[in-house]
Image (cartoon, rainbow, N blue to C red):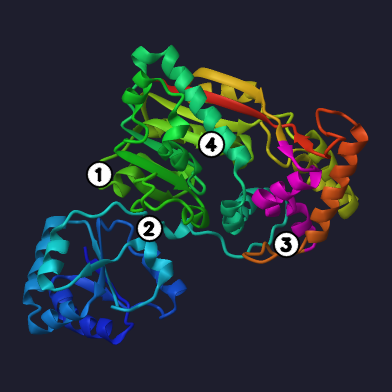
Amino acid sequence: MRSHALVISEPDSAQAAASILTPALTEANVQLFEPPGAEPPSILSFVTDLDRNARKIILLYVTPGLLASLREDSSEIRREFESLKSSESSRSIAVIVFGEKAELPELAALEPSHCADVNALKQFLRSEPKKRTSRPKGRTKDPEKFLPRGPADLPQIVKSNFARQAEVYHHHGHDMQEQHVLELLSVLYGDFVISSSRFPRVGSWLDLGCGDGLVGKKLWDKKDLGGLPEQARKRMKLRAASYRVGVDYSESMIAHCPPPTSTVDAYTHLITERVEDLTPDHLLEETDGKLGSVNLVFANDLFHWLIEEDPIKQALERAGTLLNTGGRLVASVAAEGTGRLFREAYEQLMRDELDKTEFNSWRSFIRNPIFLQEVHKFVQWAQEAGFAVNKARSEYQPLEYTGAPDYVDDAKTYGEQVFMAPLYASRNESLPETGASPFEAQWNKLGELMDELVKKKENKSFYSKEDGKYYHDQYMIYLSLEKLP
Protein backbone atom coordinates (compact mmCIF):
# COMPACT_ATOMS: atom_id res chain seq x y z
CA MET A 1 0.00 0.00 0.00
CA ARG A 2 1.43 3.36 -0.99
CA SER A 3 1.64 6.23 1.40
CA HIS A 4 0.84 9.76 0.34
CA ALA A 5 2.69 13.03 -0.03
CA LEU A 6 1.21 16.41 -0.85
CA VAL A 7 3.57 19.20 -1.87
CA ILE A 8 2.06 22.67 -1.97
CA SER A 9 4.23 24.42 -4.54
CA GLU A 10 4.20 27.93 -3.13
CA PRO A 11 6.60 29.68 -2.71
CA ASP A 12 9.76 28.73 -4.60
CA SER A 13 11.37 27.04 -1.60
CA ALA A 14 8.57 24.47 -1.51
CA GLN A 15 9.01 23.77 -5.23
CA ALA A 16 12.71 23.26 -4.69
CA ALA A 17 12.09 20.99 -1.72
CA ALA A 18 9.57 19.02 -3.75
CA SER A 19 12.06 18.40 -6.54
CA ILE A 20 14.68 17.21 -4.01
CA LEU A 21 12.28 15.07 -1.96
CA THR A 22 10.53 13.44 -4.92
CA PRO A 23 13.28 10.84 -5.59
CA ALA A 24 13.53 9.99 -1.90
CA LEU A 25 9.76 9.68 -1.60
CA THR A 26 9.52 7.58 -4.76
CA GLU A 27 12.27 5.19 -3.70
CA ALA A 28 10.54 4.81 -0.35
CA ASN A 29 7.31 3.90 -2.17
CA VAL A 30 5.67 7.18 -1.15
CA GLN A 31 3.39 8.47 -3.89
CA LEU A 32 3.57 12.19 -4.67
CA PHE A 33 0.34 14.10 -5.27
CA GLU A 34 0.20 17.59 -6.71
CA PRO A 35 -2.50 19.85 -5.27
CA PRO A 36 -5.45 20.76 -7.51
CA GLY A 37 -4.75 24.47 -7.24
CA ALA A 38 -2.96 27.15 -5.26
CA GLU A 39 -6.02 28.68 -3.61
CA PRO A 40 -6.38 27.71 0.08
CA PRO A 41 -9.96 26.30 -0.17
CA SER A 42 -8.98 23.76 -2.82
CA ILE A 43 -5.83 22.86 -0.88
CA LEU A 44 -7.82 22.38 2.32
CA SER A 45 -10.31 20.22 0.46
CA PHE A 46 -7.44 18.17 -0.94
CA VAL A 47 -5.91 17.69 2.49
CA THR A 48 -9.20 16.55 4.03
CA ASP A 49 -9.68 14.08 1.19
CA LEU A 50 -6.36 12.27 1.86
CA ASP A 51 -6.63 8.60 2.67
CA ARG A 52 -8.31 8.50 6.11
CA ASN A 53 -6.29 5.38 6.96
CA ALA A 54 -3.11 7.44 7.23
CA ARG A 55 -1.73 6.81 10.70
CA LYS A 56 0.85 9.55 10.58
CA ILE A 57 0.37 12.96 9.03
CA ILE A 58 3.66 14.77 8.38
CA LEU A 59 3.06 18.52 8.14
CA LEU A 60 6.15 20.51 7.31
CA TYR A 61 7.20 24.07 6.56
CA VAL A 62 10.26 24.32 4.30
CA THR A 63 12.75 26.60 6.03
CA PRO A 64 15.91 27.90 4.31
CA GLY A 65 18.07 25.72 6.59
CA LEU A 66 16.13 22.59 5.75
CA LEU A 67 16.22 23.38 2.04
CA ALA A 68 20.00 23.87 2.15
CA SER A 69 20.61 20.60 4.00
CA LEU A 70 18.28 18.74 1.64
CA ARG A 71 20.29 20.02 -1.31
CA GLU A 72 23.47 18.82 0.36
CA ASP A 73 22.28 15.27 1.01
CA SER A 74 18.78 13.80 0.76
CA SER A 75 19.87 10.16 1.21
CA GLU A 76 19.34 10.27 4.97
CA ILE A 77 15.77 11.43 4.52
CA ARG A 78 15.16 8.68 1.99
CA ARG A 79 16.31 6.11 4.55
CA GLU A 80 14.04 7.69 7.17
CA PHE A 81 11.05 7.39 4.86
CA GLU A 82 11.95 3.77 4.10
CA SER A 83 12.22 3.02 7.82
CA LEU A 84 8.96 4.80 8.56
CA LYS A 85 7.19 2.98 5.77
CA SER A 86 8.36 -0.46 6.88
CA SER A 87 7.40 0.23 10.49
CA GLU A 88 3.88 1.22 9.49
CA SER A 89 3.25 -2.01 7.51
CA SER A 90 -0.16 -1.63 5.86
CA ARG A 91 -0.84 1.83 7.27
CA SER A 92 -0.23 4.78 4.96
CA ILE A 93 1.63 7.99 5.71
CA ALA A 94 0.48 11.42 4.54
CA VAL A 95 3.35 13.87 3.97
CA ILE A 96 2.38 17.50 3.52
CA VAL A 97 5.10 20.03 2.70
CA PHE A 98 4.35 23.75 3.00
CA GLY A 99 6.34 26.68 1.68
CA GLU A 100 8.31 28.73 4.17
CA LYS A 101 6.21 31.91 3.91
CA ALA A 102 2.95 30.47 2.65
CA GLU A 103 0.05 32.31 4.28
CA LEU A 104 -2.67 29.71 4.51
CA PRO A 105 -4.75 30.58 7.61
CA GLU A 106 -7.40 28.02 6.62
CA LEU A 107 -4.82 25.31 7.32
CA ALA A 108 -3.68 26.63 10.70
CA ALA A 109 -5.64 23.95 12.57
CA LEU A 110 -3.43 21.31 10.91
CA GLU A 111 -0.51 22.52 13.05
CA PRO A 112 2.38 22.32 10.53
CA SER A 113 5.79 21.61 12.07
CA HIS A 114 8.94 23.67 11.54
CA CYS A 115 12.17 21.75 10.94
CA ALA A 116 15.33 23.84 10.68
CA ASP A 117 17.49 21.13 9.12
CA VAL A 118 17.67 17.47 8.14
CA ASN A 119 18.42 16.32 11.70
CA ALA A 120 15.30 18.07 12.97
CA LEU A 121 13.30 16.49 10.16
CA LYS A 122 14.66 13.04 11.06
CA GLN A 123 13.62 13.52 14.69
CA PHE A 124 10.19 14.66 13.56
CA LEU A 125 9.73 11.63 11.31
CA ARG A 126 10.55 9.36 14.24
CA SER A 127 8.19 11.13 16.66
CA GLU A 128 4.77 9.88 17.65
CA PRO A 129 1.88 11.41 15.74
CA LYS A 130 0.18 14.40 17.30
CA LYS A 131 -3.42 14.31 18.39
CA ARG A 132 -5.31 15.60 15.43
CA THR A 133 -8.71 16.32 13.97
CA SER A 134 -9.72 13.41 11.79
CA ARG A 135 -9.91 13.83 8.06
CA PRO A 136 -13.52 13.13 7.18
CA LYS A 137 -14.62 10.69 4.54
CA GLY A 138 -15.83 12.10 1.29
CA ARG A 139 -19.41 11.06 1.96
CA THR A 140 -19.59 13.08 5.16
CA LYS A 141 -18.77 16.44 3.62
CA ASP A 142 -21.25 19.23 4.15
CA PRO A 143 -23.81 19.07 1.37
CA GLU A 144 -23.71 21.00 -1.89
CA LYS A 145 -26.67 23.20 -2.83
CA PHE A 146 -29.82 21.18 -2.42
CA LEU A 147 -33.34 21.74 -3.77
CA PRO A 148 -35.90 20.32 -1.31
CA ARG A 149 -39.04 18.77 -2.75
CA GLY A 150 -41.00 17.60 0.26
CA PRO A 151 -40.96 16.27 3.85
CA ALA A 152 -38.99 13.20 2.74
CA ASP A 153 -36.02 15.54 2.23
CA LEU A 154 -36.00 16.74 5.87
CA PRO A 155 -32.89 14.73 6.90
CA GLN A 156 -30.89 16.41 4.10
CA ILE A 157 -32.42 19.78 4.95
CA VAL A 158 -31.37 19.47 8.60
CA LYS A 159 -27.83 18.59 7.53
CA SER A 160 -27.64 21.51 5.10
CA ASN A 161 -29.08 23.80 7.77
CA PHE A 162 -26.36 23.07 10.32
CA ALA A 163 -23.63 23.37 7.69
CA ARG A 164 -24.88 26.80 6.66
CA GLN A 165 -25.74 28.12 10.12
CA ALA A 166 -22.52 26.97 11.82
CA GLU A 167 -20.79 30.37 11.76
CA VAL A 168 -23.85 32.29 12.96
CA TYR A 169 -24.69 29.64 15.54
CA HIS A 170 -21.15 29.63 16.92
CA HIS A 171 -21.12 33.38 17.52
CA HIS A 172 -24.71 33.55 18.77
CA GLY A 173 -25.63 33.11 22.41
CA HIS A 174 -25.86 29.52 23.71
CA ASP A 175 -27.95 30.20 26.82
CA MET A 176 -30.51 27.51 26.07
CA GLN A 177 -27.98 24.87 25.02
CA GLU A 178 -25.66 25.66 27.96
CA GLN A 179 -28.52 25.10 30.38
CA HIS A 180 -29.15 21.73 28.75
CA VAL A 181 -25.51 20.70 29.19
CA LEU A 182 -25.53 21.60 32.88
CA GLU A 183 -28.77 19.67 33.43
CA LEU A 184 -27.24 16.74 31.55
CA LEU A 185 -24.29 16.74 33.96
CA SER A 186 -26.72 16.95 36.87
CA VAL A 187 -28.50 13.80 35.65
CA LEU A 188 -25.15 12.03 35.22
CA TYR A 189 -24.01 12.99 38.71
CA GLY A 190 -27.35 11.89 40.18
CA ASP A 191 -26.97 8.50 38.52
CA PHE A 192 -23.46 8.26 39.95
CA VAL A 193 -24.66 8.99 43.49
CA ILE A 194 -27.42 6.37 43.28
CA SER A 195 -25.36 3.63 41.60
CA SER A 196 -21.83 4.53 42.72
CA SER A 197 -20.74 0.96 43.42
CA ARG A 198 -21.45 -0.15 39.86
CA PHE A 199 -20.70 3.11 38.06
CA PRO A 200 -17.78 2.46 35.65
CA ARG A 201 -14.60 4.50 35.60
CA VAL A 202 -15.02 6.83 32.67
CA GLY A 203 -11.49 6.82 31.19
CA SER A 204 -12.77 8.02 27.81
CA TRP A 205 -15.96 9.58 26.49
CA LEU A 206 -17.77 10.44 23.26
CA ASP A 207 -19.78 13.58 22.53
CA LEU A 208 -22.26 12.63 19.79
CA GLY A 209 -23.61 15.56 17.79
CA CYS A 210 -20.93 17.75 19.36
CA GLY A 211 -21.72 20.78 17.17
CA ASP A 212 -19.24 23.54 17.98
CA GLY A 213 -17.99 21.74 21.10
CA LEU A 214 -20.22 23.08 23.86
CA VAL A 215 -20.12 19.89 25.97
CA GLY A 216 -16.33 19.61 25.68
CA LYS A 217 -15.84 23.27 26.57
CA LYS A 218 -18.17 22.99 29.57
CA LEU A 219 -16.31 19.94 30.85
CA TRP A 220 -13.02 21.77 30.38
CA ASP A 221 -14.28 24.72 32.43
CA LYS A 222 -13.61 23.71 36.04
CA LYS A 223 -16.31 25.92 37.52
CA ASP A 224 -18.99 23.93 35.70
CA LEU A 225 -17.87 20.78 37.51
CA GLY A 226 -18.18 22.42 40.89
CA GLY A 227 -21.34 20.54 41.86
CA LEU A 228 -19.69 17.17 41.42
CA PRO A 229 -18.82 15.46 44.72
CA GLU A 230 -15.12 14.87 45.31
CA GLN A 231 -15.58 11.09 45.14
CA ALA A 232 -17.31 11.40 41.78
CA ARG A 233 -14.71 13.89 40.54
CA LYS A 234 -11.87 11.45 41.24
CA ARG A 235 -13.64 8.45 39.83
CA MET A 236 -15.17 9.95 36.69
CA LYS A 237 -12.17 12.11 35.63
CA LEU A 238 -14.16 13.80 32.88
CA ARG A 239 -11.54 16.48 32.21
CA ALA A 240 -8.61 14.06 32.40
CA ALA A 241 -10.13 11.31 30.25
CA SER A 242 -7.52 9.75 27.96
CA TYR A 243 -9.77 10.08 24.92
CA ARG A 244 -12.36 12.85 24.60
CA VAL A 245 -13.92 12.40 21.19
CA GLY A 246 -16.34 14.80 19.49
CA VAL A 247 -18.50 13.52 16.62
CA ASP A 248 -20.67 15.55 14.26
CA TYR A 249 -21.81 15.11 10.67
CA SER A 250 -21.21 18.78 9.80
CA GLU A 251 -17.65 19.75 8.90
CA SER A 252 -18.67 23.38 9.38
CA MET A 253 -19.69 22.72 12.97
CA ILE A 254 -16.59 20.62 13.69
CA ALA A 255 -14.45 23.50 12.38
CA HIS A 256 -15.67 25.62 15.31
CA CYS A 257 -14.73 23.06 17.98
CA PRO A 258 -11.53 23.70 19.93
CA PRO A 259 -8.96 21.72 17.89
CA PRO A 260 -7.16 18.91 19.74
CA THR A 261 -3.94 20.92 19.78
CA SER A 262 -5.48 24.12 21.20
CA THR A 263 -4.98 25.49 24.71
CA VAL A 264 -8.60 24.54 25.50
CA ASP A 265 -7.87 20.82 25.32
CA ALA A 266 -11.55 19.88 25.29
CA TYR A 267 -11.22 17.08 22.72
CA THR A 268 -8.41 14.73 21.78
CA HIS A 269 -10.11 13.74 18.52
CA LEU A 270 -12.82 15.19 16.30
CA ILE A 271 -14.63 12.94 13.83
CA THR A 272 -16.96 13.99 11.01
CA GLU A 273 -19.53 11.22 10.71
CA ARG A 274 -23.25 10.54 10.99
CA VAL A 275 -24.06 9.13 14.42
CA GLU A 276 -26.01 6.32 12.78
CA ASP A 277 -22.87 5.34 10.80
CA LEU A 278 -20.27 5.56 13.57
CA THR A 279 -18.83 2.15 14.48
CA PRO A 280 -16.21 0.78 16.89
CA ASP A 281 -13.98 0.26 13.82
CA HIS A 282 -14.15 4.00 13.10
CA LEU A 283 -13.06 4.75 16.65
CA LEU A 284 -10.19 2.27 16.41
CA GLU A 285 -9.10 3.80 13.12
CA GLU A 286 -9.15 7.36 14.45
CA THR A 287 -7.28 6.47 17.65
CA ASP A 288 -4.61 4.26 16.10
CA GLY A 289 -6.23 1.07 17.37
CA LYS A 290 -6.40 2.20 21.00
CA LEU A 291 -10.11 2.96 21.48
CA GLY A 292 -13.05 0.95 20.20
CA SER A 293 -15.60 1.57 22.94
CA VAL A 294 -16.13 3.88 25.93
CA ASN A 295 -17.92 3.99 29.27
CA LEU A 296 -19.67 7.32 28.69
CA VAL A 297 -21.51 8.90 25.74
CA PHE A 298 -23.02 12.40 25.73
CA ALA A 299 -25.85 13.31 23.35
CA ASN A 300 -26.88 16.91 24.02
CA ASP A 301 -29.80 18.18 21.90
CA LEU A 302 -29.12 15.48 19.31
CA PHE A 303 -31.94 12.98 19.04
CA HIS A 304 -34.84 15.30 18.20
CA TRP A 305 -32.90 16.54 15.16
CA LEU A 306 -32.91 13.02 13.75
CA ILE A 307 -36.56 13.78 13.00
CA GLU A 308 -38.19 10.37 12.78
CA GLU A 309 -38.59 7.30 14.96
CA ASP A 310 -36.44 4.94 12.88
CA PRO A 311 -33.31 7.17 12.75
CA ILE A 312 -33.65 7.83 16.50
CA LYS A 313 -33.85 4.10 17.20
CA GLN A 314 -30.85 3.47 14.92
CA ALA A 315 -28.82 6.12 16.73
CA LEU A 316 -29.70 4.61 20.13
CA GLU A 317 -28.64 1.17 18.92
CA ARG A 318 -25.42 2.60 17.46
CA ALA A 319 -24.62 4.35 20.74
CA GLY A 320 -25.06 0.98 22.44
CA THR A 321 -22.42 -0.61 20.19
CA LEU A 322 -19.95 2.11 21.23
CA LEU A 323 -20.51 1.55 24.97
CA ASN A 324 -19.03 -1.10 27.21
CA THR A 325 -21.48 -3.08 29.35
CA GLY A 326 -22.50 -0.85 32.25
CA GLY A 327 -21.51 2.30 30.33
CA ARG A 328 -23.80 5.33 30.33
CA LEU A 329 -25.52 7.29 27.59
CA VAL A 330 -26.71 10.64 28.93
CA ALA A 331 -29.00 12.60 26.64
CA SER A 332 -31.07 15.77 26.48
CA VAL A 333 -34.06 15.83 24.10
CA ALA A 334 -36.53 18.62 23.30
CA ALA A 335 -39.90 17.57 24.71
CA GLU A 336 -43.54 17.90 23.68
CA GLY A 337 -45.14 21.07 25.07
CA THR A 338 -42.30 23.36 24.00
CA GLY A 339 -43.03 26.62 22.19
CA ARG A 340 -46.82 26.48 22.01
CA LEU A 341 -47.25 30.08 20.83
CA PHE A 342 -44.29 29.86 18.46
CA ARG A 343 -45.81 26.77 16.83
CA GLU A 344 -49.22 28.46 16.60
CA ALA A 345 -47.69 31.51 14.90
CA TYR A 346 -45.58 29.29 12.65
CA GLU A 347 -48.62 27.29 11.51
CA GLN A 348 -50.46 30.53 10.75
CA LEU A 349 -47.52 31.77 8.66
CA MET A 350 -47.42 28.55 6.65
CA ARG A 351 -51.20 28.68 6.04
CA ASP A 352 -50.75 32.21 4.68
CA GLU A 353 -47.76 31.34 2.50
CA LEU A 354 -48.69 27.90 1.08
CA ASP A 355 -51.63 26.73 -0.96
CA LYS A 356 -53.89 24.08 0.53
CA THR A 357 -52.21 21.14 -1.23
CA GLU A 358 -48.72 22.28 -0.20
CA PHE A 359 -49.82 22.86 3.38
CA ASN A 360 -51.39 19.42 3.64
CA SER A 361 -48.26 17.72 2.29
CA TRP A 362 -46.22 19.38 5.07
CA ARG A 363 -48.96 19.29 7.74
CA SER A 364 -47.26 16.82 10.13
CA PHE A 365 -43.99 18.75 10.05
CA ILE A 366 -45.64 22.16 10.35
CA ARG A 367 -47.39 21.09 13.54
CA ASN A 368 -44.14 19.87 15.11
CA PRO A 369 -41.25 21.65 13.35
CA ILE A 370 -38.88 21.18 16.32
CA PHE A 371 -39.37 17.38 16.29
CA LEU A 372 -40.44 17.37 19.94
CA GLN A 373 -40.46 13.98 21.68
CA GLU A 374 -42.51 12.37 24.46
CA VAL A 375 -40.68 10.93 27.45
CA HIS A 376 -42.59 7.63 27.60
CA LYS A 377 -41.86 6.90 23.93
CA PHE A 378 -38.18 7.70 24.30
CA VAL A 379 -37.91 5.46 27.35
CA GLN A 380 -39.51 2.64 25.37
CA TRP A 381 -37.11 3.10 22.43
CA ALA A 382 -34.11 3.13 24.79
CA GLN A 383 -35.23 -0.10 26.42
CA GLU A 384 -35.75 -1.72 23.02
CA ALA A 385 -32.19 -0.68 22.10
CA GLY A 386 -30.75 -2.61 25.07
CA PHE A 387 -30.55 0.06 27.77
CA ALA A 388 -31.73 0.16 31.36
CA VAL A 389 -33.25 3.58 32.04
CA ASN A 390 -31.67 4.70 35.30
CA LYS A 391 -33.08 8.21 35.13
CA ALA A 392 -35.61 9.90 32.87
CA ARG A 393 -37.24 13.18 33.70
CA SER A 394 -39.17 15.83 31.83
CA GLU A 395 -38.59 19.39 33.00
CA TYR A 396 -40.12 22.77 32.34
CA GLN A 397 -37.30 25.27 31.84
CA PRO A 398 -38.68 28.68 30.80
CA LEU A 399 -36.24 31.04 29.11
CA GLU A 400 -36.48 34.81 29.23
CA TYR A 401 -36.29 36.89 26.01
CA THR A 402 -36.54 40.65 25.56
CA GLY A 403 -39.60 39.99 23.40
CA ALA A 404 -41.25 37.33 21.24
CA PRO A 405 -39.39 38.50 18.08
CA ASP A 406 -36.14 37.91 19.98
CA TYR A 407 -37.03 34.23 20.35
CA VAL A 408 -37.95 34.03 16.66
CA ASP A 409 -34.48 35.41 15.89
CA ASP A 410 -33.03 32.63 18.07
CA ALA A 411 -35.01 30.01 16.14
CA LYS A 412 -33.75 31.48 12.87
CA THR A 413 -30.17 31.25 14.12
CA TYR A 414 -30.21 27.52 14.70
CA GLY A 415 -32.89 26.40 12.23
CA GLU A 416 -33.40 28.82 9.33
CA GLN A 417 -33.54 26.23 6.55
CA VAL A 418 -35.47 23.71 8.64
CA PHE A 419 -38.29 26.07 9.57
CA MET A 420 -38.51 27.55 6.08
CA ALA A 421 -38.24 24.15 4.35
CA PRO A 422 -41.87 24.21 3.09
CA LEU A 423 -41.23 27.61 1.49
CA TYR A 424 -37.95 26.52 -0.11
CA ALA A 425 -39.85 23.60 -1.66
CA SER A 426 -42.86 25.71 -2.67
CA ARG A 427 -40.73 28.41 -4.35
CA ASN A 428 -38.27 25.93 -5.95
CA GLU A 429 -35.45 27.63 -4.02
CA SER A 430 -32.20 25.73 -3.48
CA LEU A 431 -30.89 25.82 0.08
CA PRO A 432 -28.27 28.60 0.08
CA GLU A 433 -24.76 27.83 1.33
CA THR A 434 -24.10 31.43 2.45
CA GLY A 435 -25.74 34.84 2.58
CA ALA A 436 -29.05 36.09 3.84
CA SER A 437 -32.18 34.00 3.89
CA PRO A 438 -34.45 34.50 0.86
CA PHE A 439 -37.30 34.55 3.37
CA GLU A 440 -36.34 37.50 5.58
CA ALA A 441 -39.83 39.00 5.09
CA GLN A 442 -41.46 35.77 6.29
CA TRP A 443 -39.19 35.64 9.36
CA ASN A 444 -40.18 39.21 10.20
CA LYS A 445 -43.83 38.32 9.74
CA LEU A 446 -43.40 35.29 12.02
CA GLY A 447 -41.97 37.57 14.70
CA GLU A 448 -44.96 39.91 14.36
CA LEU A 449 -47.49 37.06 14.46
CA MET A 450 -45.92 35.62 17.58
CA ASP A 451 -45.73 39.03 19.27
CA GLU A 452 -49.43 39.54 18.63
CA LEU A 453 -50.28 36.09 20.05
CA VAL A 454 -48.18 36.59 23.17
CA LYS A 455 -49.73 39.96 23.96
CA LYS A 456 -53.22 38.75 23.13
CA LYS A 457 -52.96 35.89 25.62
CA GLU A 458 -52.22 38.33 28.45
CA ASN A 459 -50.74 35.39 30.31
CA LYS A 460 -48.00 36.21 32.79
CA SER A 461 -46.46 32.81 32.07
CA PHE A 462 -45.57 34.09 28.60
CA TYR A 463 -45.49 37.88 28.75
CA SER A 464 -44.63 40.72 31.11
CA LYS A 465 -46.62 43.91 30.41
CA GLU A 466 -44.21 45.93 32.48
CA ASP A 467 -41.13 45.35 30.31
CA GLY A 468 -42.47 43.42 27.30
CA LYS A 469 -40.39 40.33 28.02
CA TYR A 470 -41.37 36.98 26.57
CA TYR A 471 -40.95 33.77 28.59
CA HIS A 472 -40.38 30.83 26.28
CA ASP A 473 -41.98 27.59 27.41
CA GLN A 474 -39.17 25.06 27.01
CA TYR A 475 -39.69 21.44 28.04
CA MET A 476 -36.76 19.02 28.04
CA ILE A 477 -36.23 15.31 28.61
CA TYR A 478 -33.04 14.26 30.43
CA LEU A 479 -31.99 10.64 30.56
CA SER A 480 -29.21 8.47 31.94
CA LEU A 481 -29.20 5.09 30.19
CA GLU A 482 -27.11 2.08 31.19
CA LYS A 483 -25.88 -0.39 28.58
CA LEU A 484 -27.09 -3.88 29.49
CA PRO A 485 -25.03 -7.07 28.81
Q: Is residue 168 magenta?
A: no
Q: Which mark is residue 437?
A: 3
Residue where numbered disc 1 is placed = 289
**Can you tell which of label 4 and label 1 is closer to the viewer?**
4
Observer-nearest of 248 and 92: 248
**Can you tell which of label 3 and label 2 is closer to the viewer?**
3
Q: Is residue 459 left or right of residue 304?
A: right
Outermost residue to the right:
456
Q: Residue at x 79, y 43 (%)?
A: 403
The Cα atoms of the two marked residues, 3 and 4, are separated by: 27 Å
Q: Is residue 419 magenta?
A: yes
Q: Position of residue 330 (x, y in %)?
A: 49, 28
Q: Amino acid at mark 4?
A: Asn
The Cα atoms of the two marked residues, 3 and 2, are separated by: 30 Å
Q: Say which label, 3 or 1, has the lower sequence index.
A: 1
**Can you tell which of label 4 and label 2 is closer to the viewer?**
4
Quarter of the figure with the C terminus: top left
Crowd band around label 4 with a 10 angstrom C-alpha radius: few (<14), some (14–19), many (20+): many
Q: Amino acid at mark 1?
A: Gly
Q: Position of residue 436 (x, y in %)?
A: 70, 64
The Cα atoms of the two marked residues, 3 and 1, are separated by: 44 Å
Residue where numbered disc 2 is placed = 135
Q: Is residue 463 left or right of residue 412?
A: right
Kindly state the secondary structure of the residue where label 4 is placed: strand
Q: Say which label, 3 or 4, has the lower sequence index.
A: 4
The reply to whether residue 115 is visible in this rendering is: yes
Q: Say which label, 4 or 1, has the lower sequence index.
A: 1
